């Protein structure tokens, strides 16, 4: 596809697999940009498809739109993101992704065990948490959160 070609919002939606309403939302958040035709219709450069692919990949890994905006905002709007720029973006997200993976692993590994919630309702809680001692450490599943922090 000619990267200088302008696409309608419908064409962008079809090519990217992203709903028109989502494209409007992304534009309102400053993630993508369009121009207007003489008839006041949105026109996007074909390069927006690359930006949308980056957004989709980042969202699939759980990265929020604000973090994505911050990363792609380092480059001019509707510019061609190079392989080197993608490596820079993805490496900046790597530490956060690794921390979340460790948290998910801790959750997976602890699902059948006591997580330190303080409920005292399990018949066989390895911790038994007498007098809700973990509750004094703060809210939430103290054992699970502690394991996640230790793995980081």
Image: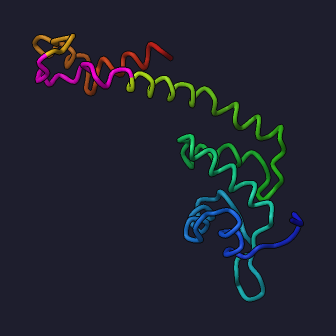
Residue 136 occupies quadrant: top left
- Give residue 54's position: percent from left, percent from top: 69, 49
Q: Does 123 appear above or below 44?
A: above
Residue shown at the point (49%, 23%) measured from the top left: 102
Residue nearest the viewer, comparing 38 with 121:
121
Give the magenta part as a residue range.
109-123
Residue shown at the point (64%, 51%) measured from the top left: 55
- Give residue 146's position: percent from left, percent from top: 36, 16
| Direction bottom: furthest residue | 39
Residue 18 occupies quadrant: bottom right
- Give residue 113's position: percent from left, percent from top: 27, 19
The reply, left or right, for residue 105 in relation to residue 36 is left
* Principal secondary structure, stretch drawn in magenta: loop
Q: How many marks?
A: 0
Q: Quadrant of the N terminus?
A: bottom right
Residue nearest the viewer, comparing 78 with 7:
7
The stretch drawn in magenta includes residue 40: no
Q: Does 39 appear above or below 111?
A: below
Residue 7 occupies quadrant: bottom right
- Give residue 13's position: percent from left, percent from top: 65, 69
Residue shown at the point (70%, 77%) measured from the top left: 42
The reply, left or right, for residue 145 in relation to residue 92 is left
Residue nearest the viewer, comparing 47 with 138:
47
């Amino acid at each position: 596809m000619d990267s200088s070609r302008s696409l309608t919002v419908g064409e962008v939606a079809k090519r990217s697999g992203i709903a028109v309403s989502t494209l409007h939302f992304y534009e309102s958040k400053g993630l993508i940009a369009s121009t207007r035709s003489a008839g006041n219709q949105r026109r996007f450069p074909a390069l927006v498809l690359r930006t949308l692919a980056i957004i989709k990949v980042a969202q699939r890994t759980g990265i929020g739109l604000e973090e994505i905006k911050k990363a792609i905002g380092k480059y001019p709007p509707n510019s061609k993101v190079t392989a080197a720029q993608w490596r820079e973006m993805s490496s900046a997200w790597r530490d956060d992704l690794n921390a979340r993976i460790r948290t998910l692993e801790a959750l997976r590994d602890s699902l059948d065990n006591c997580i330190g919630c303080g409920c005292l309702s399990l018949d066989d809680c390895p911790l038994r948490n007498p007098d809700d001692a973990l509750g004094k450490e703060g809210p939430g599943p103290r054992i699970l959160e502690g394991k996640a922090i230790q793995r980081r």
